[in-house]
Image: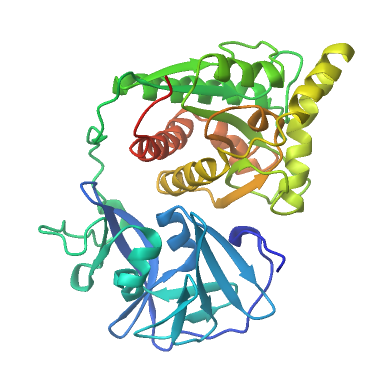
Amino acid sequence: MFSCRFLMAVPFIFPLSVFAEASPISIAFAHTGSPPKIVSGYREGSNYFLSANEMARLYGAQIYWRPVSKIVELSRLGKIVAFEANAEDASVSGKVVPLKSPIVWSASEAWIPVSFLESPAFADWSGIPAFFDAPKALLTIGESKPSSAAVAPSHPQAVPVAKTQPSYGHIWVRKLRIVVDPGHGGKDPGARGIHGTLEKDINLKAALELARLLKKTGVFEVRLTRHDDTFVSLSKRSEIANNWKADLFVSLHSNAAKDPRDSGFETYFMSEKASDPHAQRLAEFENSSINYESKFRQQAEVQMLLGELSKTEYVNASSEFAGLVSRETGGEVNIPDRGVEQAGFYVLRGTHAPAILFEMGYLTNPKDEQDLRNENFRRRLMRGLYAGIIEYAKKIKTPKK
């Protein structure tokens, strides 16, 4: 078993394999029926390349490095696709699949030929066919050959901004129930920014905006764990979701780090084993909210939370949910997407529904703190999270009764 970390946090440097006469490009991609968005790529002659990190984001997959053997793996719903440095083939669920052009490695990034995404083997792995129109640099995910492909923009500013009402594809017996949880509150301030910004305040403002977006669709019922600067125990937050029979649970937080250069958003789901030391430290900080509870209540709640250790039925669903949120949010904001990770968060452990914890940015980073204080930025950030919820909601066939 190899030691793994998510891509955005990996410090390993691989030997350079420079693109000969290659140029960076913008590739537009569109999920069927959606306006195109922009991702970065490279072109070398007639070959187009997409970074492994972008692939993971587009397909809601987790990504791991195997630094010794110089292999990168994408995992989705328990299935693995693996790429090796400079190899002319890939491994898809253990099956060797030839590539039209080799994997290109540049520093700590792997570049995958876009043509691979059109292959039947990759479509079988992802469950989603894809078609790449090279003259338009347009990748369409959801059809093997679109009947009418939109013209790709020549630069990011040309991306259509018109928003369309989402099509869910299901008629439910009742509206989907979503609990939005603004982390911390009251006597528990959470993290503190370098200019004094309190995490509890940012979390609440963002939660109110996300709730507004969700209610506006008319297909969701939304409940907040707190509506003002009130302290709510970790177990009470889970209890609110469970008693209401919530279909989804989203806990909003703002990060902090010793290094003021740390920046970006992160998406977490519940796991008893943290994906890396950073995730473990974050879980310990978020779980420390339990110290604000009374001694006897704290003991009772610890016992309740430990009793939830055996609940794993929502882990896979939460992983997929987190991947979709990470992917969609990355297209809305100009701060780094630090990827999907996992750790033992108490507030997720006690919730009986697909659940994620979303770290919106670092209050200890000057730019992130300024962004999180900005209403327009928070609106864009929540619009990305909202889009991820929409994508996951399409997969829910039957809400809880």
What percent of the width, then of the height, locates residue 285? 77, 35
Report the side of 127 relative to 295 (left or right). left
What percent of the width, then of the height, locates residue 160? 23, 47
Residue ranking furthest to the right: 295
Quarter of the image where the C terminus is located = top left
What percent of the width, then of the height, locates residue 178? 46, 23
Count of numbered tags: 0
Report the side of 157 relative to 353 (left or right). left
Query: Which residue corresponds to the image point at 48% horizontal and 67% vertical from the top-left?
Result: 52
Query: Which residue corresponds to the image point at 62% horizontal and 59% vertical from the top-left?
Result: 6
Residue placed most toward the observer, 370 or 165: 165
Residue placed most toward the observer, 208 or 287: 287
What percent of the width, then of the height, locates residue 257? 74, 44
Query: Which residue corresponds to the image point at 78% horizontal and 19% vertical from the top-left?
Result: 301
Q: Quadrant of residue 172?
A: top left
Q: Is residue 281 above or below residue 231?
A: below
Quarter of the image where the N terminus is located = bottom right
